Amino acid sequence: MAELGLCSRREADEWIARGWVRVDGVPASVGQQVGPQARIEVDRAAQGRQRDQVTILLHKPVGYVSGQAEDGHRPAASLIGPRTHWQGDASRTRFSPSQLRGLAPCGRLDIDSVGLLVLTQDGRIARQLIGEDSTVDKEYLVRVQYGDVAQDVRAAFPEERLALLRHGLALDGQRLKPAQVEWQNPEQLRFVLTEGKKRQIRRMCEQVGLKVVGLKRIRIGGVRLGQLPVGQWRYLGPDERF
C-alpha cells in the first residue's frame, strides 16, 4: 500500500487492524503477502481520515531543533499554534489542537539554521520528502567566510574548490551526489541538494576551507519559503506540490 502511494506503512497497519482494507474482496490481515495483480480496496473511513491530515510549512528560527527536544532546546513543532499562524495564509483550514497529533518533521534543519521546515501528518508526503527513493531537491542560501576573508569571498575562493563542492566530496565514507553550487553574491553561495545528511552543507564547506556563518533553506521541491515570517507557519495549499 505504501509502495502504491496510498498511505504510509504505519497508516496501512492501522487501516488493516480497523478492517478498512480488503484484498480481492476479503478483509486484509497485518503482514499479509499480496501479489502485484491483487485488487486492494480502502474503506471511505480511511480516505476521510486522510483528507483531514494537515501539512504545515514553518519558518524555523535559530535555536529550535527539528525533531524531539534535546539538550534543553525546544522542538520546532512547539511553535505551531494559533498565535503564530501567519495572517497571510491563503488556506481556509482552521487550526485545531488535533492537528498536532502525529505531526512530524520531514527531514532536518540544524539548530543554528533557519528557513523552511515541513511538518506533516500525511505519511505519503513524509515518504515523498524523506523516503529512501526521494528525489525532491532542496535549495539553500549559505553565507560563508574563507579564512580571514569575510567580504568578497568569491574573489578569494579558488575555482577548483568550488568544483569540489559541486561533485567530488564524501561524508561518512560515502561519496556525495552531485550538487548545484554557485555564487548568489560575493559572500553567499546557493546550494541545491537532492540528499540530506546530517549537517551536510556545513561539513562540505569545512572540507574546502569555508566557514558557514549563516544558512537558510528557501525551497523544498516546488514549495518556497516566500514571505513567511520567521517563527510563523502556514498550511500547505491544495494546489501546492513538492
Image: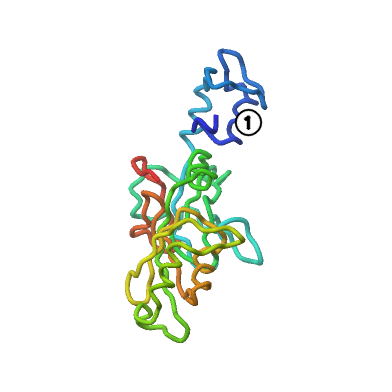
Q: Residue furthest bottom?
A: 148
For the point 65% across and 23% down, the residue is 32
Q: Kindly indicate the quadrant of the structure image that contains residue 160.
A: bottom left
Front-most of residues 130 and 178: 178
Front-most of residues 72 and 133: 133
Front-most of residues 54 and 222: 222
Position of 86 compared to 60: left or right?
left
Q: Is residue 233 above or below residue 28?
A: below
Position of 9 compared to 211: left or right?
right
Position of 24 compared to 71: left or right?
left
Front-most of residues 99 and 194: 194
x, y percentage for residue 214?
A: 45, 72
For the point 49% across and 65% down, the residue is 201
> For the residue marked with disc 1, what is the amino acid?
Asp
Q: Residues within 10 Å of mark 1 (few under 14, many from 20)?
A: some
x, y percentage for residue 44?
A: 49, 23
For the point 62% across and 56% down, the residue is 68
x, y percentage for residue 213?
A: 47, 75
Check the picture and name the quadrant holding the N terminus: top right
Q: Is residue 107 above or below residue 5?
A: below
Q: Which residue is mark 1?
A: 13
Q: Kindly indicate the quadrant of the structure image that contains residue 203.
A: bottom right
Mark 1 element type: helix
Numbered label tally: 1
Query: Which colour style is shown?
Result: rainbow
x, y percentage for residue 46?
A: 53, 27
For the point 41% across and 67% down, the residue is 163
Q: Residue furthest top?
A: 25
Q: Is residue 210 above or below residue 136?
A: below
